[in-house]
Image (cartoon, rainbow, N blue to C red):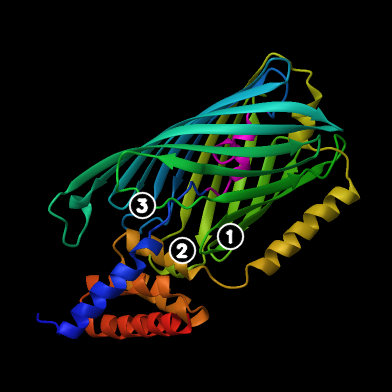
């Protein structure tokens, strides 16, 4: 099919102008039951269960069941408290498949702990190695000349974590920097996490409540938060409900048995446009706790609650209210990037166009042009390129 010289010139010019500013950001692990083991996104969590206490966990997540190429994640981790409650160390490994990409990672975590008032303040560092493999023969569309690509990156992150008998909060950047010899990694956009929660109840309460919230912030994407509440019965069984902003509502259950073992399961009901192409998300967890200090009071109170504290509840309630006000519209850009990555170009076009209705964003227009080109919508792509060129000329004249 022949294209006009005008179209070719517009395309080359705009791609040259915006190539520096456009890239698809790295995806961090997405979990519904993130409280099961916060070590996966905050290294300062290592050793937080109490002196001489360690845990080991396995977690599986099948996201957007029925959506071809959707993420499937298997992860395992462990951490232990050492040196008289001063140091925590942890190890995490995981495998994730998204579309044509397969990622394997192993990461070490170190946390130093100091006593602060009635709790502990922890600072943590993370160092990991990731192995990426792309198999383009799995794609249903045309593939490049080289069907297989692979590269490795080294990444590092940091976090802080403070916890008392019945309250905790933390902040972290799991991927603060990356290093690689490969030129294929592009720009890696850091994810910033804030998380907090508390346990309401005491040892005499028949039912205890465990509300928690997780913020996820990254450049060029609206903040996302996950809010959940677990109701614990007889200290060993819990049911929970969770909400991830503009993405899913989930139900979960968790049981502790034989004092050292725990098992949990969660199911997400997708509320984003992807719900039309998937049957939800399944997540399963299994954990083991080992300890040489069975009388440690903090491990029991941290999981099964301290006494009801009105001040603590007020703080968490304010955080939940602020988070609800901060996210007022759907994260179309993130959904569009995810669909583009999975070669779902028609869905990516819909998400990018919906995003542009709410926000004038030339970087997104370039992504829209890419998706339109892949679906042979050349005339529509030309219109978008003309808009981009007009805006660029107007900005140049203003300068």
Residues at marks 1 and 2 touching, judged by CB atoms closer than 8 Å:
yes
Residue beneath disc 3: 186
Residues at marks 3 and 1 touching, judged by CB atoms closer than 8 Å:
no
Q: Is residue 381 above or below residue 96?
A: below
Q: Does residue 69 belong to the magenta stretch? A: no
User: How would you rate the neighbour count of disc 3 (Cα within 10 Å): few for under 14, some for 14-19, many for 20 or more?
Assistant: few
**What percent of the width, then of the height, locates residue 190?**
51, 50
In this view, the residue in front, 258 or 22, is 22
Label placed on residue 334: 2
Residue beneath disc 1: 224
Element type at mark 1: strand
Q: Is residue 22 visible?
A: no
Q: Is residue 319 left or right of residue 128?
A: right
Range of magenta residues? 31-47
Q: Rounded to the nearest whole Å, what is the CA distance between mark 1 and mark 2?
A: 10 Å
Instruction: From the image, state whether disc 2 or disc 3 is nearer to you.
Output: 3
Q: Rounded to the nearest whole Å, what is the CA distance between mark 2 and mark 3?
A: 17 Å
User: How would you rate the neighbour count of disc 2 (Cα within 10 Å): few for under 14, some for 14-19, many for 20 or more?
Assistant: some
In this view, the residue in front, 11 or 327, is 11
Marked residue nearer the N-terminal end (2 or 3): 3
**Residue depicted at x 76% and y 34%:** 302
Which quarter of the figure has residue 202? Answer: top right
**Residue depicted at x 89% and y 50%:** 311
In this view, the residue in front, 46 or 230, is 46
**Residue depicted at x 70% and y 35%:** 236
Element type at mark 2: helix
Residues at marks 2 and 3 touching, judged by CB atoms closer than 8 Å:
no
Q: Is residue 325 visible?
A: yes
Farthest left residue in view: 1
User: How would you rate the neighbour count of disc 1 (Cα within 10 Å): few for under 14, some for 14-19, many for 20 or more?
Assistant: many
């Amino acid at each position: 099919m022949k294209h006009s010289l005008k179209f070719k010139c517009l395309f080359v010019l705009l791609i040259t102008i915006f190539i520096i500013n456009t890239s698809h950001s790295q995806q961090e692990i997405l979990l519904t039951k993130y409280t099961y083991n916060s070590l996966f996104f905050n290294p300062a969590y290592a050793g937080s269960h109490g002196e001489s206490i360690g845990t080991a966990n396995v977690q599986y997540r099948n996201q957007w069941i029925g959506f071809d190429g959707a993420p499937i994640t298997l992860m395992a981790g462990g951490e232990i408290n050492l040196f008289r409650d001063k140091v925590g160390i942890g190890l995490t490994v995981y495998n994730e498949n998204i579309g044509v990409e397969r990622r394997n990672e192993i990461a070490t975590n170190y946390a130093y702990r100091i006593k602060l008032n009635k709790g502990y303040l922890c600072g943590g560092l993370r160092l990991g190695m990731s192995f990426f493999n792309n198999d383009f023969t799995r794609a249903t569309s045309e593939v490049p000349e080289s069907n297989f690509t692979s590269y490795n990156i080294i990444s590092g992150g940091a976090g802080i974590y403070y916890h008392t008998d019945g309250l905790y909060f933390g902040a972290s950047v799991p991927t603060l920097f990356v290093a690689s010899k490969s030129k294929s990694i592009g720009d890696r956009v850091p994810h910033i996490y804030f998380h907090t929660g508390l346990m309401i109840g005491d040892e005499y309460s028949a039912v205890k409540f465990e509300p928690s919230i997780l913020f996820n912030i990254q450049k060029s994407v609206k903040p996302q938060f996950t809010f959940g509440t677990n109701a614990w019965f007889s200290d060993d069984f819990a049911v929970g409900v969770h909400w991830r902003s503009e993405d899913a509502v989930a139900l979960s259950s968790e049981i502790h048995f034989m004092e050292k073992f725990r098992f949990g399961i969660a199911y997400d009901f997708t509320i984003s446009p992807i719900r039309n192409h998937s049957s939800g998300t399944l997540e399963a967890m299994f954990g083991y706790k080992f300890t040489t200090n069975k009388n440690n009071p903090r491990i029991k109170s941290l999981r099964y609650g301290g006494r009801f504290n009105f001040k603590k509840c007020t703080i968490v309630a304010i955080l939940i209210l602020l988070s609800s006000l901060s996210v007022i519209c759907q994260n179309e850009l993130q959904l569009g990037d995810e669909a583009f990555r999975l070669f779902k170009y028609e869905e990516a076009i819909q998400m990018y166009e919906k995003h542009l209705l709410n926000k004038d964003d030339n970087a997104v227009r370039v992504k829209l042009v890419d998706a339109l080109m892949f679906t042979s919508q050349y005339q529509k792509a030309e219109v978008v390129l003309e808009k981009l060129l007009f805006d660029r000329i107007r900005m140049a004249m203003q300068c």
